[in-house]
Amino acid sequence: MPAATSVRHAALLALLNIKNGAYVNLELQSAMKRYGSWSQADKAFFTELLYGTMRRQLYIDHFIGRWSRISIARMDPVLLCAIRMGIYQIHFLNSVPAYAAIFDTCEALKRIKPQFVGFLNAVLRTASRETDWQINAPSDSTEYMAIEYSHPLWLVKRWVARFGTVKAKSVMQRNNEAPMVWLRYNSLRITKVNATGIMQRKGIPWQSVPEIDAAYGMVQTPVEAVRDEIALGLFSVQDIGSMLVSMLLNPQPGESILDLCAAPGSKSCHMAELMKNEGRVISVDLHAHRVELIRANAQRTGCSIVEPLCRDAAVPWDEGEVDAVLLDAPCSGTGVLRRKADARWSKSEQHLKDLQQLQRRLLKTAAGALRKGGRLIYSTCSLEPEENEDNIKWFLSEFRNFSLSEVPALPVSDIPGSLSGVTTMTSALGHGDGFFIAILSKSMVGV
């Protein structure tokens, strides 16, 4: 089978799996392992098809609804995925000739459900001839913005109300761009000079940020370029927003740190490195297979003080056991929609309310585990106040022996909030994911 058809066939199967509930990042990882013989160009094209089709799904569906005599709701799932993938290539990938997109996408579908190939071919040919890509909605409406930027309408309405139209458009436009891959070098294994030397020898262009000495942002370079170095534990893939969370906790050698909801262990290992591998980092996750990810990361990086633990993080901990707690809470992920292209289609406002209850249970656990005088960081990769400022206000009203510490000023674009002392960022240092951070301190006196 020709490489172009093979890549499209694999992408079509992955899109179908995602439609049935799989995660886009896991489908990508699985494909990279399964098709290890693919060229770098094939791997890049597969990634583009997968993430691009997911990001632009609502926009594409608007035009499918215009051209197809079968409604999306009644369409066979694999046919729908093939049409979406084909239109994405035709409209968004200038490097792919329309005839190639049509032929190879039809060939990919033929291997799964050949009875739909004629219909697919007709829709894609219509798309290739189309010159009118105007959206059927007033250009100043949230409905128009939802389609144009391919975000769910409920989220667009929230962001426009909170950020204003210009800021909301900027955030959504950024979410449709491919994110930069950030690496953090392992200070237990190599020095800054060694790390820079590796990047230079491999000819990898990178960006850096003054606030995070260990970070390298790879410019238009796939992570496979440093796969061997990652396997040896010299580097870890981690967004700079995630790095900032561990740095702001400021773990010290000899301390006992509790990392709730820790999988896959990137922050736990980062903290162990900052602690010079002296002390304890107790890394908790609910699911055994995710605990194994923590264990594997710790072994790969030589972080021997990381102690993976399979446990429900919401269950109360022994009172006053640890010096510091990092709670990077499960959240809606509205700050990482660039990286998790499927997440925008699986969330709702009700989901925010459900998550808030879990987040507050976890905050209670964190408060109890912390010794007097200890510190707690609460963070999310969400931009929504229900998961962020509202939770901190609730926490401070429930736990009067805690106070809010000021997050250091960072040169980023902040979202104005109603609570001083916390940081909500649409992107970290102008490059990374969006996130929220609050630093809380437990009093030396009282309960």
Image: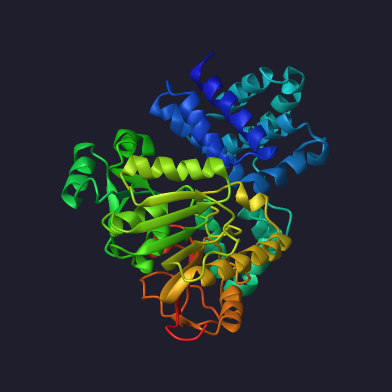
Say if residue 165 shows up in the picture. Answer: yes
Q: Is residue 92 left or right of residue 214?
A: right
Identified at 75% across, 23% down, the residue is 116
Position of residue 49 measured from the top left corner of the image (x, y, whole percent): 54, 35
Seen in the picture, residue 354 relative to 181 is either above or below; the reply is below
Position of residue 141 measured from the top left corner of the image (x, y, whole percent): 70, 65
Say if residue 425 shows up in the picture. Answer: no
Identified at 65% across, 66% down, the residue is 356
User: Which of 304 and 39 lies nearest the eye of the viewer?
Assistant: 304
Position of residue 426 measured from the top left corner of the image (x, y, whole percent): 49, 65
Furthest-front residue in view?
A: 318
Identified at 76% across, 43% down, the residue is 66
Asked where in the image residue 212 lies, by quadrant, the reply is bottom left
Seen in the picture, residue 399 relative to 20 is either above or below; the reply is below
Q: Is residue 396 left or right of residue 110?
A: left
Q: Is residue 8 left or right of residue 62?
A: left
Position of residue 152 measured from the top left corner of the image (x, y, whole percent): 68, 56
Q: Is residue 231 left or right of residue 394?
A: left
Seen in the picture, residue 204 relative to 423 is either above or below; the reply is above
User: Which of 416 and 229 lies nearest the eye of the viewer?
Assistant: 229
Q: Split into 4 quadrants, where in the image is the N terminus? A: top right
Total marks shown come to 0
Furthest-top residue in view?
A: 1
